């Protein structure tokens, strides 16, 4: 059986879409008058950032950064910065958009680096917050969905490099 056929559906495409729209409304309420710079975290943040962008009805700027600490593995390693944002950050309000807050190591390192680069404020938005019960170094300001403490994929999140293109969220079976 293929990996997808054996996976368990965690959030349907409809549930993901509704949650993204709710977060877009929350972000609009909070940041509409701050001309934020939205930073997409490559690669997993692409679908979430893309859908959010079409639903944020106020002026903003857009850029990206690329960091990784999982590669094709299911457990995290050392964080590697591949690309830093190219637009100036000094004095800006940032909104960093990523697919998942798991241990929180990636997002905390991104926030610390962006504030070091001179950003005035750094808000964070994640599609999925993983519920593993351990302390995280930061809480995201905007969370679309929670996911169980399992390796999940779809809607930006890969499994062994594949299936970022799924419109729903799945979990690997434990066996
Ligand atoms: O909260 P953490 O435990 O730090 O994990 C979250 C990070 O892990 C994934 O990135 P990954 O390293 O797989 O890079 P990718 O998005 O390019 O796949 C995901 O996109 C987050 O950035
Ligand atoms: N695809 C994927 N990437 C992650 N990065 C951290 N946790 C996860 C996860 O559960 N799935």
Image (tube, grey):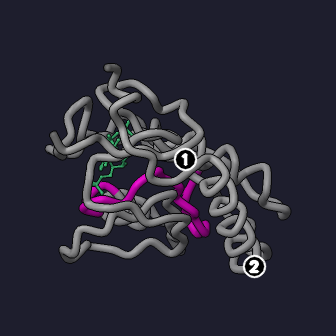
| Spot occupied by residue 133 in the image (x, y as percentages of width and height) | 22, 75
Q: Image check: 172 left or right of 48? A: left
Q: Image check: 2 left or right of 32? A: left
Q: Which residues are magenta?
A: 88-106
- Judging by the rendered image, the residue that carries numbered circle 2 is 29
**What element does badge 2 sit on?**
helix
Q: Which is more N-terminal, label 1 or label 2?
A: 2
Q: Residue at x 56, y 40 (%)?
A: 46
Q: Image check: 28 left or right of 115? A: right
Q: Say if the magenta span includes residue 1.
A: no
- Pick the quarter of the image with the C terminus: top left
Q: Quadrant of residue 147?
A: bottom left
Asked whether the beta carbons under mark 2 and mark 1 sit within 8 Å of each other, the answer is no
Q: Is residue 61 above or below residue 142?
A: above
**What element does badge 1 sit on?**
strand
Q: Residue at x 31, y 20 (%)?
A: 1
| Spot occupied by residue 122 in the image (x, y as percentages of width and height) | 50, 69
Disc 2 crowd rating (10 Å Cα; few below 14, some 14-19, many 20+) is: few
Q: Is residue 100 visible?
A: yes
Q: Residue at x 75, y 58 (%)?
A: 60
């Amino acid at each position: 059986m293929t990996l997808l056929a054996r996976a368990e559906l965690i959030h349907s495409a409809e549930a993901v879409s509704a949650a993204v729209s709710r977060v877009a409304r929350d972000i609009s309420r909070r940041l509409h008058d701050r001309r934020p710079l939205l930073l997409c975290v490559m690669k997993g943040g692409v679908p979430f950032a893309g859908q959010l962008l079409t639903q944020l009805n106020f002026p903003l700027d857009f850029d990206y950064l690329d960091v990784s600490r999982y590669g094709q593995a299911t457990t995290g390693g050392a964080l590697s910065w591949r690309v830093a944002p190219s637009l100036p950050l000094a004095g800006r309000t940032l909104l960093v958009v990523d697919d998942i807050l798991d241990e929180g190591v990636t997002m905390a390192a991104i926030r610390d680096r962006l504030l070091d680069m001179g950003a005035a404020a750094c808000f964070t938005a994640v599609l999925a917050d993983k519920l593993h019960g351990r302390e995280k170094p930061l809480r995201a300001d905007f969370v679309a969905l929670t996911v169980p403490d399992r390796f999940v994929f779809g809607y930006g999140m890969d499994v062994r490099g594949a299936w970022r293109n799924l419109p729903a969220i799945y979990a690997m079976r434990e066996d």
